[in-house]
Image: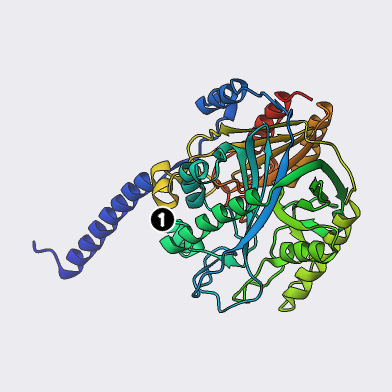
Protein backbone atom coordinates (compact mmCIF):
# COMPACT_ATOMS: atom_id res chain seq x y z
CA UNK A 1 0.00 0.00 0.00
CA UNK A 2 1.37 3.39 -0.96
CA UNK A 3 1.79 5.95 1.75
CA UNK A 4 -0.39 8.95 1.07
CA UNK A 5 1.07 12.36 0.46
CA UNK A 6 -0.42 13.48 3.78
CA UNK A 7 1.24 10.61 5.58
CA UNK A 8 4.60 11.45 4.05
CA UNK A 9 4.20 15.05 5.12
CA UNK A 10 3.30 14.05 8.68
CA UNK A 11 6.28 11.69 8.81
CA UNK A 12 8.62 14.42 7.54
CA UNK A 13 7.31 16.90 10.13
CA UNK A 14 7.72 14.32 12.86
CA UNK A 15 11.32 13.60 11.87
CA UNK A 16 12.05 17.31 11.60
CA UNK A 17 10.70 17.93 15.11
CA UNK A 18 12.60 14.92 16.47
CA UNK A 19 15.97 15.92 15.02
CA UNK A 20 15.42 19.59 15.86
CA UNK A 21 14.73 18.55 19.43
CA UNK A 22 17.89 16.47 19.48
CA UNK A 23 19.88 19.40 18.12
CA UNK A 24 18.46 21.77 20.73
CA UNK A 25 19.20 19.29 23.51
CA UNK A 26 22.77 18.86 22.26
CA UNK A 27 23.18 22.61 21.95
CA UNK A 28 21.78 23.09 25.43
CA UNK A 29 24.25 20.56 26.85
CA UNK A 30 27.11 22.37 25.12
CA UNK A 31 26.08 25.84 26.33
CA UNK A 32 24.47 25.30 29.71
CA UNK A 33 24.86 23.32 32.92
CA UNK A 34 23.04 23.07 36.26
CA UNK A 35 23.88 25.63 38.93
CA UNK A 36 26.53 24.46 41.37
CA UNK A 37 24.73 25.12 44.65
CA UNK A 38 27.44 23.75 46.90
CA UNK A 39 28.50 26.04 49.75
CA UNK A 40 31.81 27.76 49.09
CA UNK A 41 33.39 25.97 52.07
CA UNK A 42 32.88 22.67 50.23
CA UNK A 43 34.82 23.82 47.16
CA UNK A 44 38.54 23.78 46.41
CA UNK A 45 38.92 27.53 45.84
CA UNK A 46 38.00 28.25 49.48
CA UNK A 47 41.11 26.62 50.95
CA UNK A 48 43.27 28.28 48.29
CA UNK A 49 41.83 31.67 49.24
CA UNK A 50 42.43 31.15 52.96
CA UNK A 51 45.98 30.08 52.24
CA UNK A 52 46.61 33.16 50.09
CA UNK A 53 45.43 35.46 52.90
CA UNK A 54 47.13 33.67 55.77
CA UNK A 55 50.48 33.25 54.00
CA UNK A 56 50.70 36.92 53.06
CA UNK A 57 53.42 38.81 54.92
CA UNK A 58 51.32 41.56 56.50
CA UNK A 59 54.35 43.60 57.46
CA UNK A 60 53.80 47.32 57.94
CA UNK A 61 56.54 49.78 57.10
CA UNK A 62 57.37 52.06 60.00
CA UNK A 63 57.97 55.53 58.59
CA UNK A 64 61.43 56.71 59.62
CA UNK A 65 61.96 59.41 57.03
CA UNK A 66 60.17 62.44 55.65
CA UNK A 67 57.08 61.39 53.71
CA UNK A 68 55.99 63.46 50.73
CA UNK A 69 52.86 63.58 48.58
CA UNK A 70 51.63 65.07 45.32
CA UNK A 71 48.58 64.89 43.08
CA UNK A 72 47.44 65.54 39.53
CA UNK A 73 44.67 64.89 37.02
CA UNK A 74 44.79 64.35 33.24
CA UNK A 75 41.82 64.51 30.81
CA UNK A 76 40.60 61.41 28.99
CA UNK A 77 38.26 62.84 26.36
CA UNK A 78 38.78 61.28 22.91
CA UNK A 79 39.28 63.48 19.86
CA UNK A 80 36.19 62.07 18.14
CA UNK A 81 32.88 60.59 19.37
CA UNK A 82 33.06 56.97 20.49
CA UNK A 83 30.67 54.57 22.18
CA UNK A 84 29.53 55.31 25.71
CA UNK A 85 29.54 52.76 28.56
CA UNK A 86 26.77 52.62 31.14
CA UNK A 87 23.13 51.60 31.53
CA UNK A 88 23.54 48.09 30.12
CA UNK A 89 23.76 47.81 26.34
CA UNK A 90 25.97 50.56 24.91
CA UNK A 91 23.91 53.52 23.70
CA UNK A 92 26.23 54.40 20.84
CA UNK A 93 28.58 57.34 20.42
CA UNK A 94 28.39 60.45 22.58
CA UNK A 95 27.14 63.60 20.86
CA UNK A 96 28.90 66.23 22.95
CA UNK A 97 30.99 66.75 26.07
CA UNK A 98 28.94 68.21 28.91
CA UNK A 99 31.86 68.12 31.36
CA UNK A 100 35.29 66.65 30.84
CA UNK A 101 36.43 63.23 32.07
CA UNK A 102 39.72 62.73 33.93
CA UNK A 103 42.14 60.30 35.47
CA UNK A 104 43.07 61.41 39.01
CA UNK A 105 46.12 60.35 40.99
CA UNK A 106 47.48 60.92 44.48
CA UNK A 107 51.00 59.58 45.03
CA UNK A 108 53.02 59.56 48.21
CA UNK A 109 56.48 58.35 49.13
CA UNK A 110 57.25 56.72 52.45
CA UNK A 111 60.62 55.15 53.31
CA UNK A 112 61.69 55.49 49.66
CA UNK A 113 58.66 53.48 48.51
CA UNK A 114 55.92 55.01 46.38
CA UNK A 115 52.21 54.38 46.88
CA UNK A 116 49.26 55.70 44.90
CA UNK A 117 45.49 55.92 44.61
CA UNK A 118 44.19 56.29 41.04
CA UNK A 119 40.60 56.92 39.97
CA UNK A 120 39.05 57.40 36.53
CA UNK A 121 35.80 58.97 35.33
CA UNK A 122 34.69 55.67 33.83
CA UNK A 123 32.08 53.02 34.51
CA UNK A 124 34.77 50.77 35.99
CA UNK A 125 38.56 50.83 36.01
CA UNK A 126 39.13 48.86 32.79
CA UNK A 127 40.77 45.43 33.19
CA UNK A 128 42.57 46.07 29.88
CA UNK A 129 44.25 49.14 31.40
CA UNK A 130 45.06 47.31 34.65
CA UNK A 131 46.68 44.49 32.68
CA UNK A 132 48.88 46.99 30.84
CA UNK A 133 49.81 48.70 34.13
CA UNK A 134 50.90 45.40 35.65
CA UNK A 135 53.76 45.36 33.12
CA UNK A 136 54.57 49.04 32.74
CA UNK A 137 53.74 50.87 35.98
CA UNK A 138 56.99 50.08 37.78
CA UNK A 139 59.45 50.89 34.95
CA UNK A 140 57.61 54.14 34.08
CA UNK A 141 56.90 55.47 37.59
CA UNK A 142 58.86 53.42 40.11
CA UNK A 143 55.55 52.36 41.71
CA UNK A 144 54.93 48.66 42.28
CA UNK A 145 51.62 47.59 40.81
CA UNK A 146 50.47 46.20 44.16
CA UNK A 147 51.17 49.62 45.72
CA UNK A 148 48.58 51.31 43.50
CA UNK A 149 44.92 51.19 44.51
CA UNK A 150 42.73 51.52 41.40
CA UNK A 151 39.10 52.62 41.36
CA UNK A 152 36.56 54.60 39.30
CA UNK A 153 33.81 57.15 39.78
CA UNK A 154 31.34 54.70 38.18
CA UNK A 155 29.85 57.39 35.99
CA UNK A 156 27.34 55.89 33.57
CA UNK A 157 28.01 58.75 31.14
CA UNK A 158 31.64 57.97 30.34
CA UNK A 159 33.44 56.51 27.36
CA UNK A 160 33.62 52.88 26.34
CA UNK A 161 36.03 51.29 23.90
CA UNK A 162 38.11 49.58 26.59
CA UNK A 163 36.58 46.07 26.65
CA UNK A 164 37.05 43.21 24.22
CA UNK A 165 34.97 40.08 23.58
CA UNK A 166 31.26 39.90 22.86
CA UNK A 167 30.17 41.24 26.27
CA UNK A 168 32.54 44.19 25.93
CA UNK A 169 31.14 44.91 22.48
CA UNK A 170 27.60 44.98 23.82
CA UNK A 171 28.20 46.90 27.05
CA UNK A 172 31.14 49.16 26.29
CA UNK A 173 31.29 49.46 22.52
CA UNK A 174 34.07 46.91 22.14
CA UNK A 175 37.83 47.40 22.22
CA UNK A 176 39.62 50.31 20.57
CA UNK A 177 43.37 50.31 20.91
CA UNK A 178 43.64 54.10 20.76
CA UNK A 179 41.18 54.49 23.64
CA UNK A 180 42.99 52.04 25.90
CA UNK A 181 46.32 53.68 24.98
CA UNK A 182 44.89 57.12 25.86
CA UNK A 183 43.71 55.93 29.28
CA UNK A 184 47.01 54.16 29.99
CA UNK A 185 48.99 57.25 29.03
CA UNK A 186 46.74 59.44 31.20
CA UNK A 187 47.32 57.20 34.24
CA UNK A 188 51.09 57.33 33.78
CA UNK A 189 51.06 61.10 33.13
CA UNK A 190 48.93 61.78 36.22
CA UNK A 191 51.21 59.68 38.42
CA UNK A 192 54.39 61.22 37.05
CA UNK A 193 53.02 64.74 37.55
CA UNK A 194 51.97 63.83 41.08
CA UNK A 195 55.45 62.51 41.83
CA UNK A 196 57.16 65.59 40.39
CA UNK A 197 54.94 67.91 42.43
CA UNK A 198 55.31 65.94 45.67
CA UNK A 199 56.44 67.80 48.78
CA UNK A 200 56.57 67.24 52.53
CA UNK A 201 53.51 65.41 53.87
CA UNK A 202 52.69 66.64 57.35
CA UNK A 203 49.54 64.71 58.19
CA UNK A 204 46.95 62.22 57.02
CA UNK A 205 43.44 62.24 58.42
CA UNK A 206 40.33 60.10 58.01
CA UNK A 207 36.77 60.91 58.97
CA UNK A 208 33.23 60.10 57.91
CA UNK A 209 29.67 61.33 58.29
CA UNK A 210 26.44 59.37 57.92
CA UNK A 211 24.07 60.78 55.28
CA UNK A 212 21.46 58.04 54.79
CA UNK A 213 18.78 60.41 53.51
CA UNK A 214 20.57 61.02 50.22
CA UNK A 215 20.30 57.48 48.82
CA UNK A 216 18.10 54.40 48.61
CA UNK A 217 18.55 50.64 48.27
CA UNK A 218 16.78 49.60 45.07
CA UNK A 219 17.06 45.87 45.78
CA UNK A 220 15.90 45.45 49.38
CA UNK A 221 12.19 45.07 50.10
CA UNK A 222 12.66 45.99 53.76
CA UNK A 223 11.31 49.28 55.08
CA UNK A 224 13.41 51.18 55.79
CA UNK A 225 15.89 49.49 53.45
CA UNK A 226 19.37 48.81 54.85
CA UNK A 227 22.01 51.12 53.37
CA UNK A 228 25.52 52.31 54.03
CA UNK A 229 25.02 56.08 54.11
CA UNK A 230 28.53 57.11 55.10
CA UNK A 231 30.53 59.71 53.22
CA UNK A 232 34.16 58.79 53.89
CA UNK A 233 37.04 61.22 53.47
CA UNK A 234 40.79 60.56 53.54
CA UNK A 235 42.91 63.71 53.62
CA UNK A 236 46.56 64.32 52.77
CA UNK A 237 47.82 67.57 54.34
CA UNK A 238 51.21 68.94 53.28
CA UNK A 239 53.55 71.35 55.01
CA UNK A 240 52.68 74.01 52.42
CA UNK A 241 49.04 73.73 53.65
CA UNK A 242 47.90 72.15 50.37
CA UNK A 243 45.30 69.46 50.93
CA UNK A 244 44.12 66.54 48.81
CA UNK A 245 40.99 64.56 49.65
CA UNK A 246 39.84 61.09 48.66
CA UNK A 247 36.04 61.03 48.89
CA UNK A 248 34.11 57.76 48.81
CA UNK A 249 30.35 57.37 48.62
CA UNK A 250 28.04 54.48 47.81
CA UNK A 251 25.38 55.96 45.51
CA UNK A 252 25.63 54.89 41.86
CA UNK A 253 26.60 57.79 39.60
CA UNK A 254 23.37 57.58 37.61
CA UNK A 255 21.81 61.02 38.00
CA UNK A 256 22.38 61.84 34.32
CA UNK A 257 19.59 60.36 32.19
CA UNK A 258 20.59 57.64 29.68
CA UNK A 259 18.82 59.53 26.89
CA UNK A 260 21.39 62.31 27.22
CA UNK A 261 24.25 61.19 24.96
CA UNK A 262 26.76 63.50 26.62
CA UNK A 263 29.97 62.78 28.47
CA UNK A 264 29.69 63.68 32.13
CA UNK A 265 31.24 62.86 35.48
CA UNK A 266 27.72 62.89 36.97
CA UNK A 267 27.44 63.89 40.65
CA UNK A 268 31.08 62.98 41.54
CA UNK A 269 32.16 65.76 39.16
CA UNK A 270 30.01 68.36 40.92
CA UNK A 271 31.28 67.08 44.27
CA UNK A 272 34.92 67.44 43.22
CA UNK A 273 34.36 70.86 41.64
CA UNK A 274 32.55 72.15 44.73
CA UNK A 275 35.39 71.03 46.97
CA UNK A 276 37.95 72.83 44.81
CA UNK A 277 35.80 75.97 44.58
CA UNK A 278 35.57 76.08 48.37
CA UNK A 279 39.35 76.68 48.49
CA UNK A 280 39.49 74.37 51.50
CA UNK A 281 40.77 71.56 49.28
CA UNK A 282 43.34 71.86 46.50
CA UNK A 283 42.69 68.48 44.92
CA UNK A 284 39.96 65.86 45.21
CA UNK A 285 39.52 62.32 43.94
CA UNK A 286 36.27 60.34 44.03
CA UNK A 287 36.26 56.61 44.74
CA UNK A 288 33.18 54.42 44.37
CA UNK A 289 32.36 52.79 47.67
CA UNK A 290 30.11 49.77 48.24
CA UNK A 291 27.76 50.74 45.44
CA UNK A 292 25.70 47.60 44.74
CA UNK A 293 21.98 48.44 44.99
CA UNK A 294 22.68 51.94 46.35
CA UNK A 295 21.21 54.75 44.24
CA UNK A 296 20.59 58.49 44.74
CA UNK A 297 17.18 59.67 45.89
CA UNK A 298 15.67 61.50 42.93
CA UNK A 299 12.79 61.76 40.51
CA UNK A 300 14.51 60.93 37.25
CA UNK A 301 13.95 63.29 34.33
CA UNK A 302 15.78 65.23 31.68
CA UNK A 303 16.74 67.82 34.30
CA UNK A 304 19.46 65.31 35.17
CA UNK A 305 22.30 67.77 35.60
CA UNK A 306 20.35 69.66 38.25
CA UNK A 307 19.95 66.39 40.12
CA UNK A 308 23.65 65.63 39.78
CA UNK A 309 24.59 69.15 40.86
CA UNK A 310 22.27 68.99 43.88
CA UNK A 311 23.67 65.69 45.15
CA UNK A 312 27.29 66.62 44.44
CA UNK A 313 27.13 70.02 46.12
CA UNK A 314 25.27 68.67 49.16
CA UNK A 315 27.92 65.99 49.64
CA UNK A 316 30.64 68.60 49.23
CA UNK A 317 29.20 70.68 52.08
CA UNK A 318 29.50 67.70 54.43
CA UNK A 319 32.98 66.82 53.15
CA UNK A 320 34.12 70.41 53.81
CA UNK A 321 32.81 70.08 57.36
CA UNK A 322 35.28 67.21 57.81
CA UNK A 323 38.27 69.30 56.75
CA UNK A 324 40.86 69.30 59.52
CA UNK A 325 43.85 71.54 60.04
CA UNK A 326 45.87 68.64 61.40
CA UNK A 327 45.83 64.87 61.59
CA UNK A 328 48.46 62.24 62.28
CA UNK A 329 51.89 61.94 60.70
CA UNK A 330 52.11 58.95 58.39
CA UNK A 331 53.83 56.53 60.72
CA UNK A 332 52.67 53.18 59.25
CA UNK A 333 52.01 52.20 55.66
CA UNK A 334 51.70 49.11 53.52
CA UNK A 335 50.08 47.69 50.39
CA UNK A 336 49.39 44.14 49.28
CA UNK A 337 47.70 42.32 46.45
CA UNK A 338 45.97 39.03 47.28
CA UNK A 339 44.87 36.61 44.52
CA UNK A 340 41.09 36.23 44.51
CA UNK A 341 39.64 32.76 43.91
CA UNK A 342 35.95 32.42 43.04
CA UNK A 343 35.58 29.06 41.35
CA UNK A 344 33.87 28.74 37.98
CA UNK A 345 31.71 31.67 36.78
CA UNK A 346 27.96 31.03 37.04
CA UNK A 347 25.90 33.42 34.94
CA UNK A 348 22.28 32.28 35.29
CA UNK A 349 20.10 31.67 32.26
CA UNK A 350 17.15 30.19 34.20
CA UNK A 351 16.49 29.52 37.87
CA UNK A 352 18.42 26.27 37.61
CA UNK A 353 20.89 26.63 34.74
CA UNK A 354 23.97 28.71 34.05
CA UNK A 355 26.29 29.28 31.13
CA UNK A 356 29.09 26.78 31.03
CA UNK A 357 32.36 28.35 32.23
CA UNK A 358 33.97 27.85 28.82
CA UNK A 359 31.12 29.74 27.16
CA UNK A 360 31.19 32.48 29.78
CA UNK A 361 34.93 32.98 29.31
CA UNK A 362 34.45 33.08 25.54
CA UNK A 363 31.81 35.81 25.88
CA UNK A 364 33.35 37.80 28.75
CA UNK A 365 37.04 36.90 28.61
CA UNK A 366 39.31 35.84 31.45
CA UNK A 367 41.08 38.26 33.76
CA UNK A 368 43.40 38.09 36.76
CA UNK A 369 41.46 38.79 39.95
CA UNK A 370 42.82 40.10 43.22
CA UNK A 371 42.04 41.99 46.40
CA UNK A 372 43.86 45.30 46.76
CA UNK A 373 44.77 46.07 50.37
CA UNK A 374 46.34 49.29 51.67
CA UNK A 375 47.18 50.65 55.13
CA UNK A 376 47.76 54.24 56.20
CA UNK A 377 48.19 54.28 59.99
CA UNK A 378 44.94 52.82 61.38
CA UNK A 379 43.01 53.15 58.11
CA UNK A 380 42.51 49.91 56.16
CA UNK A 381 41.51 50.36 52.50
CA UNK A 382 40.30 47.46 50.38
CA UNK A 383 39.79 47.58 46.62
CA UNK A 384 37.46 44.93 45.17
CA UNK A 385 36.77 43.81 41.56
CA UNK A 386 32.99 44.16 41.72
CA UNK A 387 29.94 46.13 42.70
CA UNK A 388 29.68 45.06 46.36
CA UNK A 389 26.68 45.79 48.53
CA UNK A 390 26.78 48.43 51.24
CA UNK A 391 24.56 46.14 53.30
CA UNK A 392 27.75 44.39 54.41
CA UNK A 393 29.31 47.60 55.70
CA UNK A 394 28.07 47.70 59.30
CA UNK A 395 29.24 44.16 60.05
CA UNK A 396 32.65 44.76 58.49
CA UNK A 397 33.09 48.15 60.13
CA UNK A 398 32.41 46.54 63.51
CA UNK A 399 35.06 43.89 62.85
CA UNK A 400 37.55 46.60 61.89
CA UNK A 401 36.69 48.63 65.01
CA UNK A 402 37.50 45.58 67.13
CA UNK A 403 41.01 45.80 65.68
CA UNK A 404 41.04 49.57 66.32
CA UNK A 405 40.92 50.26 62.59
CA UNK A 406 38.85 52.43 60.30
CA UNK A 407 37.64 50.75 57.11
CA UNK A 408 37.24 52.08 53.58
CA UNK A 409 36.06 49.67 50.86
CA UNK A 410 36.19 50.71 47.20
CA UNK A 411 34.95 49.04 44.02
CA UNK A 412 36.37 48.45 40.51
CA UNK A 413 40.03 47.76 41.33
CA UNK A 414 41.01 46.75 37.79
CA UNK A 415 39.01 43.53 37.56
CA UNK A 416 35.27 42.98 37.38
CA UNK A 417 33.08 40.00 38.39
CA UNK A 418 29.64 41.61 38.55
CA UNK A 419 27.47 42.23 41.61
CA UNK A 420 28.04 40.82 45.07
CA UNK A 421 24.86 41.13 47.15
CA UNK A 422 23.51 39.46 50.32
CA UNK A 423 22.74 35.80 49.72
CA UNK A 424 19.11 36.24 50.75
CA UNK A 425 18.56 38.10 47.46
CA UNK A 426 20.04 35.42 45.22
CA UNK A 427 16.66 34.15 44.02
CA UNK A 428 15.20 37.60 43.42
CA UNK A 429 14.39 38.16 39.78
CA UNK A 430 16.23 41.46 39.40
CA UNK A 431 19.07 42.61 37.12
CA UNK A 432 21.55 42.79 40.01
CA UNK A 433 20.87 39.22 41.09
CA UNK A 434 20.29 37.66 37.66
CA UNK A 435 22.10 39.31 34.75
CA UNK A 436 24.84 40.85 36.91
CA UNK A 437 25.51 37.99 39.33
CA UNK A 438 28.35 36.16 37.63
CA UNK A 439 29.75 34.23 40.58
CA UNK A 440 26.90 32.02 41.81
CA UNK A 441 25.23 31.46 45.18
CA UNK A 442 26.76 32.08 48.61
CA UNK A 443 29.25 34.67 47.35
CA UNK A 444 27.92 37.44 49.60
CA UNK A 445 28.89 35.42 52.68
CA UNK A 446 32.15 34.45 50.97
CA UNK A 447 33.23 38.05 50.41
CA UNK A 448 32.29 38.97 53.98
CA UNK A 449 34.43 36.11 55.26
CA UNK A 450 37.52 36.85 53.20
CA UNK A 451 37.34 40.58 53.99
CA UNK A 452 36.93 39.68 57.67
CA UNK A 453 40.00 37.46 57.50
CA UNK A 454 42.03 40.28 55.95
CA UNK A 455 40.89 42.52 58.82
CA UNK A 456 41.87 39.88 61.37
CA UNK A 457 45.38 39.68 59.88
CA UNK A 458 46.00 43.38 60.54
CA UNK A 459 47.96 44.70 63.47
CA UNK A 460 46.58 47.87 65.11
In the figure, 359 relative to 317: above or below? Answer: above
In terms of image quadrants, where is residue 260?
bottom right
Q: Which quadrant is the C terminus positioned in?
A: top right
Q: Position of residue 27 (x, y in %)?
A: 33, 50
In terms of image quadrants, where is residue 1?
bottom left
Please, what secondary structure does the residue beneath circle 1 have? helix
- Residue density around tag 1, few if under 14, some if 14–19, many if 20 or more, within 10 Å: some
Q: Which residue bears the numbered disc 1?
A: 165
395 horizontally vs 73: left or right: right
Residue at the image position 59 percent from the left and 76 percent from the top: 261
365 vs 245, nearest the viewer:
245
Residue at the image position 59 percent from the left and 51 percent from the top: 192
87 vs 433, nearest the viewer:
87
Q: Is residue 113 visible?
A: yes
Q: Position of residue 77 (x, y in %)?
A: 56, 68
140 horizontally vs 375: left or right: left
296 vs 328, nearest the viewer:
328
In the figure, 107 relative to 74: above or below? Answer: above
Q: Position of residue 407 (x, y in %)?
A: 77, 38
Amino acid sequence: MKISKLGKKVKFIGLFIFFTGLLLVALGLLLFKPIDKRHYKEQDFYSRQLQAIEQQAWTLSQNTCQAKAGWAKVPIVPAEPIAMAGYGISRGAFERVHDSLYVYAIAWQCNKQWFAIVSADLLIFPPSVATWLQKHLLPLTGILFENALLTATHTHSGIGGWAGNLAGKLMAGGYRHEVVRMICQAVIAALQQAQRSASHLSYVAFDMVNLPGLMSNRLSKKRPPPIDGYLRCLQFIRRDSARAMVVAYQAHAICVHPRLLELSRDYPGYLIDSLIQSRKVEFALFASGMVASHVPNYNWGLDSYELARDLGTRLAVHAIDLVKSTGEPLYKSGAWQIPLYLGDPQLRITDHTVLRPEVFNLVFGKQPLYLSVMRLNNLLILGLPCDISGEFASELMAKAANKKLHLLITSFNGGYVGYITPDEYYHYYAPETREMNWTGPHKGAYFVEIISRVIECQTP
